[in-house]
Every structure is written in C-alpha cells, then in structure tokens.
Image (cartoon, helix red, strand yellow):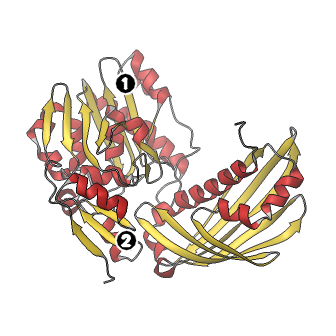
Amino acid sequence: MAMQMNGEVQLPAQREEVWARLNDTETLKACIPGCETLDKLSDTEFAAVATVKIGPVKARWRAKVMLSDLDPPNGYRISGEGEGGVAGFAKGGATVALAEKDGGTLMSYNVDAHIGGKLAQLGQRLVNGAAKKMADEFFANFAKAVSPPPPA
Amino acid sequence: MYAFTYHRATGLRQAGNMLGKLEDSKILAGGQTLLPTMKQRLASPANLIDLGKVDGLKGIELKGRSLVIGAMTTHSEVATSPVVQQAIPALAELASMIGDPAVRHMGTLGGSIANNDPNSDYPAALVGLGATVITTKRRIEADAFFTGLFETALEADEIITKVSFPVPKKAAYMKFRNPASRFALVGVFVAKRSSEIRVAVTGAGASGVFRVPAFEEALKKRFSPKSLEGLSIPATGLNSDIHGSAEYRAHLVGVMARRAVAKAG
C-alpha cells in the first residue's frame, strides 16, 4: 500500500549550512528514527540498520539509502529501500527543497512510502499514522540538529 | 515458536526491577495485543514479565468521590461490576463494548492504556473523566499520560498500578465502531462535573485521544445537544485510511458528541 504526506519547517540556519548537513552521514544517522548504523558506501549511497518500534510492533530493518537529483543548495531526493524480516518490506523517499526565507531556510518535503508484506496486511489501520510519525520525527530531529544550541 | 524467557513476577518491585534490568523485556498483562503481535512475529521480545500473580493489582473500589480500579482488572470485570454501574455507568458501558468476549475476559485496563492504541476506548474515558493514572513511581494526570500514537508518559521501568476516576455528575460514551474489529472508528466521551465539562475523542486523531475545547465551551453555556449544532472540528490531524477519510471522521466526531450529550441527559 502507498501513502503520501508533506510538510515544511522553518530552520534558523543558512541554506548552505542546511544543505551540508543534509549530506552529512552523522547528521542523517542522528535524525533517522531508531537508526543504529549508517555506513557510507559512496557519496550518494548508504547502508542503514534501524529498529522501528511502534506500539506492540518492533522490527529491525536493513535498508539502502540513496541520494539523487542533487541540486546544491536547492534540494535533493533521499530514498530508501528496506527489508524488515518477517514484517515485510518498505520503500520510500522524500523530495526535499530548500529556500531562503526570513534570514533562515524554509525546508519543504514531499514524502511517499510503500509498504508490503505482513505489516501492510495486519497493520493497515496504523500504517499511515506510523509513517507520518516517522517522517515528522526525522524532520523534527533535523530541525533540532541545525538549530544553534541554547546559550549555556 | 521462537525462544523467549517467561518470568512470573510475584511482586511489583521485582517486576519493575526486571523490566529495568532485563534486556528487551515487555510486561505481559492481558496479552490481547502483545500475544497476537508475537504470534505474527511482528515483535519478538526476549523477556516477558507476567503480572498475573502480582497481588493488589486487581479490584474496584469507591473511595470518596473517586472510583479506583486496579490495572489488572479485566474489561469484563469493569463492565459487570455493580460498583462501576452505579458510580459511572458510562464507564461500565464503555468496557462492555471493547473488542469481543475473549478480549474482554483477558484484556486489562492497565494493558490497554499502556498500549495507547489510537482506536482503543479507554483513553477516551480517562481523558473525558479527567482520571489520574497511578504507577509504581508517581501519579500522572490523564491529559499528560497519553503523549502520541502508541506513546505514553510511562518510563521504561514504570508500571501502572491503578487508575482513579473522579465520579462525574453526568457522562456518556458513544462509539461508532468498525464492525469487523470493533475498534472505535470514532468514539466520544462526554462528562460533566460540577466545575468542568470534558469532551474526549478517540479513534479519529492521528496522534490518539484528544479533547475538543470548542465543544466544551459550548456545553458549558448549556449542556444540551443543541449547543453543539453547527459546530464541527477541522479534518486536519485526523486519520485517513480505507475505513474512512479524515473529513468523514471529523463529521462523525460532531455526530457522536451530540449523541453522547443527549445520552448523558
């Protein structure tokens, strides 16, 4: 089954800085919910292992993450394809666009996701909410990562 | 069957310690969500800590103006209790509508709210009545307990022991159920206390249970279904799936709220 969602978030950082962080392995690792490892295979490819826990369901996913349509510093597409063992499979991605706004950066995103297998069958009533929650969490984490730390 | 270790806890402190120390552990209450999930291999905890033999977690008691229900009390026990039927009939009726007989005889109050399924019934009752969740560590107001989709304020080694429901003047729960799963497509719990009116909605919100301040304000002026006429909630932030669109759910919230107010009388 497929789902789509979108959103935007205003970031208190310059566009070049945001762009650099969107391409930084450590930042991505810290922002992907439940990410355990993220290994860089090339400039645009990563191998990821993430544990996703939503309510009673807990599955460990092995995924390949790719960056494409690179247009620095305006945006790119980040996509992934993963196997969650018996839980099923998932693939999806987000098209991310960066625009200068109010001295900071407006990041807007369009997310599309497809899941199949047992999780899609049984978790149908929850998949939309869960996917939205994951995407929101990623972009919230990212916003936090690029915001300057509060004064000590 | 895959291997996991079953622990039968004999005391709350022991259960809490195990939950904190044992790797990848889960509390087993009634098991009506956890066990089917494990059978489907969608979860495979290494350790299950069964609360079934822990004393003091079951029971229903009227203490002053509050109805106190133990966390391991089953839905069926709540539904058929003369004490609940007398003090908060809406709560007994809500419990009688959860799932099917097997779920009601095994499933527990504590298990249901700890899971915080966005379509489950109890969260509406707790938030609607302004209940307090009592745990091994503290007391948590219902408004602060349910924090999102399947998320609660519970810490990793914290266990719910009971829930205290203030007895309202009037209350009613109306549920538009999914005919197959009997989960709430939309459920609205309305309660009137001397100083406060609460309207809590389950099943509709993408992040679980929520209150409707606009409905509460309108009902404060006059507690009548007429007060809600023409009022509606926006579809943003509501669930949309094969069972119903966000707009459909938004409409149902209004309909169920008016019916609940009418029923509360």
Q: Residues within 10 Å of mark 1 (few under 14, many from 20)?
A: many
Q: Residue at x 30, y 61 (%)?
A: B18
Q: Position of residue B224 (x, y in %)?
A: 35, 23
Q: Residue at x 53, y 69 (%)?
A: A51
**Residue nearer the viewer, B80 or B232:** B80
Say how many tags the image has: 2
Task: Identify the element where label 1 is drawn.
Answer: strand
Q: Position of residue B240 (x, y in %)?
A: 53, 54
Residue B215, by quadrant, is top left
The circle drawn on residue A124 is: none
Q: Amino acid at mark 1?
A: Ile
- Which residue does the numbered mark 1 point to in the structure image? B197
| A40 relative to B66 in the view: left or right | right
- Which residue does the numbered mark 2 point to in the structure image? B45
Labels 1 & 2 near each other (Cβ < 8 A): no
Q: Amino acid at mark 2?
A: Pro
Residue B125, by quadrant, is top left
Q: Position of residue B232 (x, y in %)?
A: 51, 34
Residue A66, by quadrant, is bottom right
Q: Residues within 10 Å of mark 2 (few under 14, many from 20)?
A: many
Does residue B48 lie above or below A46 as drawn? above
| B59 relative to A52 in the view: left or right | left
Looking at marks 1 and 2 on the same chain, the residue that comes earlier in the sequence is marked by 2
Q: Are marks 1 and 2 on the same chain?
A: yes
Residue B179 appearing in the image: no
For disc 2, the chain is: B
For disc 1, the chain is: B
